[in-house]
Amino acid sequence: MTSAEIITIGTEILLGEIVDTNTRYIARTLRSMGVDLYRTITIGDNVERIADAIRDSMEQADIVITTGGLGPTIDDPTREAVAKAIGVETEFREDLWAQVVETIARYGRTPSENQKRQAYVPKGALGLKNPVGTAPCFIVETPRNAVISLPGVPQEMEHVLHESVIPYLQNRFSLNEIIKVRILHCAGLGEGMIDEKIADLETLRNPTVGLAAHTGIVDIRIAAKAKSESEANEMIAEVETDVRERLGSIVFGADEDTLEGVVLDMVAARGMTLTAIESGLNGQLTRKVPHTASLPNLTADTLMQALRSARADSKADIALGVTIFTEERAAEMAMITPNGEKTHRITYGGPPRSLPHWSMNLALNWLRTTLEEME
């Protein structure tokens, strides 16, 4: 079973100056190849700490992929760190320097002297061409490991990963399996209650089943490892059917489905129109649902009054409203449908900053279940 770890390099990531998107992209790529990802790590621009992390990852996993730290400046430490971890010196490579010169020439410039640093790699490393950037990449091989160093710029990393790294890994490690994942989205039950209903499925070895709680939504992950996509799909489908039978309408969608998208589709499928009002949600509902007005300081009573006016003015079939009371950690929801008016008050025990998002999701799910009852 081939395993991997990912090390992202850059003090700017640790300081929160940039968001690391490379780890997610590489992780999904490895998953599709049937590689088990054990751990992901972020290290600042320190040669010794990076080298220690690489050595540790080499003991744990077959594949170690680093991103970042391959630029031309003094604080780009990856080349030196990988060499130190492997126990070799760096060496200047004319073929890699030619890559740098060729790339920079496309911009009508000549490389500066400090850019020669990019042509140094650990001694004996396999050079990888980077036709979309100035940072050459490389692979250092040991009897067990492949240490692969890729650029930190996402577009460059993705290109080299697909053009050079994937074929290399498939050949080196005889990769002939895939890991496929299906995400089921749930609303209306908390993580603990869902866990009680599917706890036995969470002990399966293949497919595996896991839970991830979000604000007002719980995801169920079903992951299968198999020799082919069709085999993985069959394994996932069997477990998914079981989950849906146990949870019923608590499962509102899968994979790229969103709660607001499902609700809007349900409204449209019934030939209806929707208007909405939010108060205190900081635009959460406005950004998700068309024809939503944001009004300040609505009480429970004034919310329903405003909802009646909005429905009358827009001639909508359905009107949904939600207002929050931060100090009370509560929200008031109101709805008008062809079947009448109703209200619902909810209280919240989580962090106050999450109250708007939580209230929005509960209001949308309330509308979803109401639409199901109208069938």
Image (cartoon, rainbow, N blue to C red):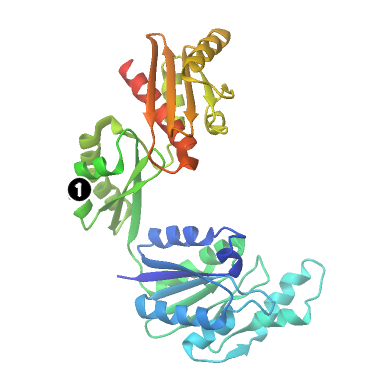
Q: Where is residue 53 in the image (x, y as percent from the top left)?
A: 46, 78
Q: Which amino acid does label 1 sit on?
A: Ala
Q: Which of 192 and 37 is in front in this view?
A: 192
Task: Kindly identify the residue that appears in the image at 39 percent across and 58 percent down.
Answer: 32
Q: Which of 74 and 122 is in front in this view?
A: 74
Q: What element carries label 1?
A: helix
Q: Is residue 125 visible?
A: no
Kindly indicate the quadrant of the structure image that contains residue 61: bottom left
Q: Position of residue 213 (x, y in %)?
A: 36, 46
Task: Kindly identify the residue that appears in the image at 66 percent across and 79 percent down.
Answer: 118
Crowdedness near tag 1: few (<14), some (14–19) or many (≥20) residues, C-alpha within 10 Å: some
| Tally of numbered discs | 1
Q: Which of 287 and 279 is in front in this view?
A: 279
What is the residue that sits farthest to the left in this orientation?
200
Q: Going by the image, does 121 lie left or right of 23?
A: right
The quarter in which the N terminus is drawn is bottom left
Q: Position of residue 316 (x, y in %)?
A: 51, 12
Q: Nearer the viewer, residue 361 or 219?
A: 361
Q: Position of residue 42 (x, y in %)?
A: 50, 68
Q: Is residue 255 visible?
A: yes
The residue identified by callout 1 is: 199
Q: Going by the image, does 302 lie left or right of 209?
A: right
| Vertical arrangement, residue 374 with respect to residue 236, above or below | above
